[in-house]
Image (cartoon, helix red, strand yellow):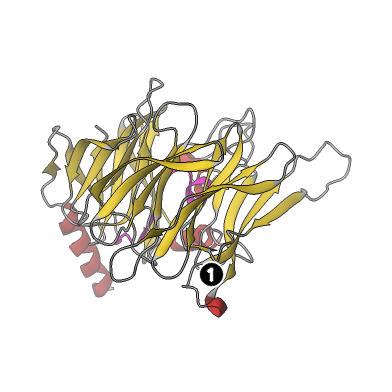
Amino acid sequence: MSDRRAVLAALLSLTALPALAAEDGSRVEPVALPFAVKAMRGPGSDVALSVATSGLLPVARAPAGASADPKATGNTAPPSVVVVWGEGGGAVLSLEGDRLRTTLIGAEAIEGFAAAETPRGAVPGSRRALDGPLSAYLTGPTRALGGAPGQGTVLTVRERQPVGVTAEPKAVPVTTQTLAPGDGRVFAGRTPQITRLDGRPAVAAVTAQGPAVSGLAVAAKGKDGVWTLRAQTPPQAGKGPEGAPLALAAVRDFTGTGQPQIAAIRAPDGEGVLQLWRIADGTLSLAGEAPGYAGPVAGEAADLAAPVPRGGGAPPDLALPVAGRSAVAVVSLKGGSPVERARLPLPAPAAHGVAVLDAGGTAKTILVGLADGRLVAVSAP
């Protein structure tokens, strides 16, 4: 018991450290938690959606009459939540008005939600993307082919089908399709991201070709319901000792054109380059890039970037760490080339994630999990 009290006292002393001030006057404030943060999942992740629709917490309870499917047609979306956890427990972060609310949850509940991120048949240690009835994840481990842990030979896309009203209960039909990148490539150990392209579902993923070469791939569902690989980028050589593959930062309409673009980090080991890729006419083209940013290194599962909704119909910005992870930058991609709008200094390097809480489509709070186990919050600029 004395050891646990000592750990708690140490954590509370860390949260008492002075807050840092950003150039725009925003203050980076520590969030008091009785455990060191080891993992973090932002809004839209499998864990956050599961918590928000579980009924486990009052703040995370779905609206009355709403389906458990948060993206179902005509359904009210669940509240925006961020979930963090470490040894001994977890917490759900949400907004109550403009104030940050923290609700502690038990370790067993967190373990169950986190385990569901890797569905049956998926590559061990990988995570699925989930959007309403659609899920996408990597299957077919490549170790026997000399691939790195976490890679997959195929991308599996599963989609629940509508069920008509019947007198007897029946299983929900599910369609499953698999896609291979071809050309000696596999899918890198990066979580896919689901979006919509020309009004139909699409999935962005990272491919790998050898230990230090990677690229982007976009799979899309056609009018006939068949999934195909719509576009791939030319292979790019990674840098750093491990030759880390590209990292997906976010897939959003960053330029306001009505179609999504892919923000990615090339060679996140050390001096990473933020890239913006456009998707058009079956091709991926590089719209702009800027050095000086960081993403997850090879084998790291943290989500170190998050869209920053601006509201009012404006395209979102992107929050991600700068090189060295000593600060989080808020970057505009509206013109194609990255333009930094704000830089928020951190009291320790970003390590476990970057997530954004919004209210009514406007970002309010940016949360960052630090390498020393603390969680900090800053008002979105």
Q: Is residue 54 visible?
A: no
For label 1, count other residues whose C-alpha is less than 10 Å away and answer few (under 14), some (14-19) or many (20+): some
When the figure is inspected, residue 363 is found, relative to residue 120, above or below; the finding is above
Query: Which of the 4 quarters of the picture holds residue 372?
Result: bottom left
- 26 or 229, nearer to the observer: 229
Residue 149 appears in view = yes
- SS for tag 1? loop
Q: Nearer the viewer, residue 49 or 335?
A: 335
Is residue 20 or residue 294 the one in the foreground?
294
In the image, is residue 60 above or below residue 90?
A: above
Q: Position of residue 107 (x, y in %)?
A: 44, 62
Residue 10 belongs to the span the image colors magenta: no
Kindly identify which residue carries mark 1: 124
Image quarter where the N terminus lies is bottom left
In the image: residue 171, left or right of residue 208: right
307 sits to left or right of 219:
left
Picture residue at 62% right of the left edge, 40% below the top = 69
**Residue 115: image location, x then y, percent:** 53, 63
The residue sitting at 63% across, 66% down in the picture is: 121
| Quarter of the view holding residue 334 | top left
Amino acid tagged 1: Pro
Residue 76 drawn at (x, y percent): 56, 30
Picture coordinates of residue 324, whole percent (x, y): 20, 57
Please tell me whether residue 43 belongs to the stretch shown in magenta.
yes
Vertical arrangement, residue 48 with respect to residue 11, above or below: above
Q: Residue at x 34, y 34 (%)?
A: 336
Q: Which residues are magenta?
A: 35-50
Question: What residue is at 63 percent from the left and 65 percent from the top?
Answer: 120
Left or right: where does residue 368 sit relative to residue 135?
Answer: left
Examine the rendered structure and indicate whether residue 354 appears above or below residue 281.
below
